[in-house]
Structures are given as structure tokens and as C-alpha cells.
Image (cartoon, helix red, strand yellow):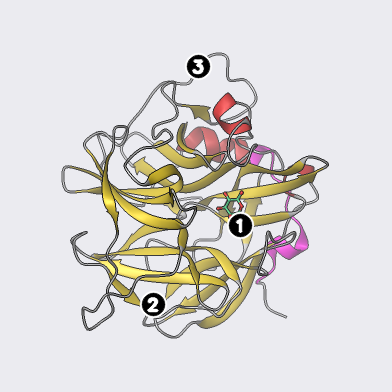
Amino acid sequence: MTKILTGSSLPNIPWEEKPATVINSPLWRYSGNPVIDRNPCKGVTRIFNSAVAPYGDGFVAVLRGEQVNGIPHIYMGYSEDAIHWKIDEEKIPFVNENGDPFMPGYAYDPRLVKVEDTYYIMWCTDFYGAAIGMAKTKDFKKFVRIENPFIPFNRNAVLFPRKINGNYVMLSRPSDSGHTPFGDIFLSESPDMVYWGRHRHVMSRGSEWWQSLKVGGGAAPIETDEGWLLFYHGVSGTCNGYVYSIGGAILDIDQPSIVKYRCENFLLTPEAPYEERGFVPNVCFPCATLQDPDTGRIAIYYGAADSVVGLAFTEVNEVVSYIKEHSKVTSADTEIGIK
Ligand code: BMA
């Protein structure tokens, strides 16, 4: 029996049992999907690729909102059940360390990770090119931007939820300035969230078609007694454009650049109408999970077709067993990742 070690009890995690019709995946979709539909609030036409976290008696979310002028920014969401969301119509009012407004030119694909007593938001920001922006908050009222961790071009940064060997650790995906037709996952360490180094390769795109073009970190890794459970995205380049699926891997607990298991099958691929049809069709883009260590339940939040937010479920034993049963790792996966 695999145990979840990240987070405390979450009895109010959203949940539905697995339907008997789901035969090809350890993940199943919430029957009420999408949980955030189009035109969710004034001035925002679509919310997708977004992250959630437990906060107080309920939940908060950092939401990628596409404004009616087409520019993405991050908005706060609040929920009692992590399904129905109240969304701020104003963008998150980021400030610098002095408290002066310090708004990014654009901001997309946010992740939200609590490390010790602080919540960190990471997103793709305009830093003379697409790069990683970061901010921190303790109360979801004051959001202080901290130094951009990496130079351009980079996307899909996500922190581990605790320090490893004394350092903060973050996954990212170096890229180019456009719709990057390549990309592997790396990790970097920092003693202070200012200086980042000890960069390591984690995993490359795979030989399997669904992840043969590029891969990128998704939700914050979940600590289990088998290793760090990572839900990531894998992309296939078809004759009709990119297809984004959700993949799963388990990283070594003390040296997470080592991939212990990596599932050769996707865990979720666009099938539902709201995943196959939308602003960008055929996208399932995971950004966050909620998990309950007591029951092993995991709720996965993912952007669907760059248009809406979807919710899927799994159970830690089922998904870890599936990943191990269908694991195919390469030497580039299992090495420490330095050359
Ligand atoms: C990527 C990112 C994501 C988006 C995906 C599919 O490059 O921009 O925000 O979901 O493309 O369009």
C-alpha cells in the first residue's frame, strides 16, 4: 500500500468513485466537468491551466484568465468544495518587495505550491522573452514578486512542496520563444529562492508517440513512500497539430533527478468533447493536485483545450501500481542528470 506523505488530512477533497466504463486509465474524469466554464467573469473569456490549494476551511486557486483583449493574467479563485469557484474580477495585484505595483506584462500557466508556511506562485512571464515569474504570499491578500529564477526561455516551472537536502527544488522546461517543438524537464536547486543552480536533467521526451515532441512538469510532485509522484504533460506532434496528454512518473525521494518509474502509457488523453474541442483543441494540461493522505484520494486539475478547467480523480495505490506496471525508463531517465 503506497502512502501519501504530502499535506495533511483533506476529508473535503472532491471525489467520485471510478466508473466501470473507464478501462484504459487509472484516472477518471469528474462527471460535472468542466468545473470552470467559458466566460467565468467579466473581462475574462476563458480560464484553463490553473492551480488550486487547500486554504483555511476551503480552497484557493490561481487561475489563468484570458482577458477579452487576449492577454493572459492570473486571477484568484475561492471555493468551499474545490468545484464551485468564486472568481475575482481583478487580476492578482502583484507588488515588489517595497509594496509598489509590479505587474507582469502577461502571466500564464500558474502553479501554486506551499513550502513551509509560504505559498509560492510560478508562472510564465514576459522577461524579455518567455521565462519563469515567481511571487509569494501567506494570506492571499499581499502577493510579493520575487526575483525571476531563470533567464529566458523557460516554461512550466513547479516547486517541490518541501526542501530536499536543505534546498528548494524546482522543475522547469527550457524552451524557445515560440510554440516550442522540443523540450525536456530539468530541475534546479536554491538555498534562498534567489540563487538557483545545481541544474540536473530529469527526463526527456519519450519514444512513445504521445510524448515524443516535448514534456513539461505539471502538478507539484506528491511525496509518497515510493518516491515523488509526478503528473506531467507529454506532447505529440500530429499532422493536425499538437496533442497534450497527462503522463505519470515517480522520482527518487532524495535525488529527484533520478526517474525510478515512468509510465509508457498516457494517464489521460483528450477524449471528452471539452478536451477535443476549444480554442486550442486536444489539450489536457495538468497544473495541480489535491490529495488526502488518509484515503489516498487524489484530485487532478487540468486545463482542457485552452478553454476550461477539468477535474480528474485517481487513488494513490491505483496510479502508482499502474505507473510501475507499465514503466519504461531510459538511461537518460535513471542517471543523475549532469554532463
Ligand atoms: C503551451 C502553453 C500552454 C497551452 C499549450 C497548448 O505552449 O502555452 O499554456 O495550454 O501550449 O496551447
The circle drawn on residue 176 is: none
| SS for callout 3 | loop
Tell me, yes or no, whether the highlighted magenta stretch contains residue 335. yes
**In this orientation, which residue lies closer to the viewer: 71 or 14?**
71
Separation (CA) of disc 2 from disc 1: 25 Å
Q: Mark 1 Cα within 10 Å, few/some/many (few <14, many 20+)?
A: many
Instruction: Locate the C terminus by quadrant.
Output: bottom right
Q: Residue 331: x and y, percent?
A: 76, 62
Visible in this render: residue 164? no
Provide the residue designation for mark 1: 216
Q: Earlier in the sequence, mark 1 or mark 3?
A: 3
Can you tell which quarter of the image residue 193 is in?
bottom left
Q: Residue 39: x and y, percent?
A: 40, 37
**Looking at the picture, does residue 57 appear above or below residue 338?**
above
Amino acid type at image mark 3: Pro
Q: Mark 3 Cα within 10 Å, few/some/many (few <14, many 20+)?
A: few
Mark 1 and mark 3 residues within 8 Å of each other at the beta carbon: no
Provide the residue designation for mark 2: 166
User: Magenta segment, which residues?
Assistant: 324-336
Question: Between tags 1 and 3, which lies in front?
Answer: 1
Tell me, yes or no, whether the highlighted magenta stretch contains residue 21. no
Provide the residue designation for mark 3: 19
Q: Residue at x 22, y 59 (%)?
A: 140
Q: Residue furthest top?
A: 20
Amino acid type at image mark 2: Gly
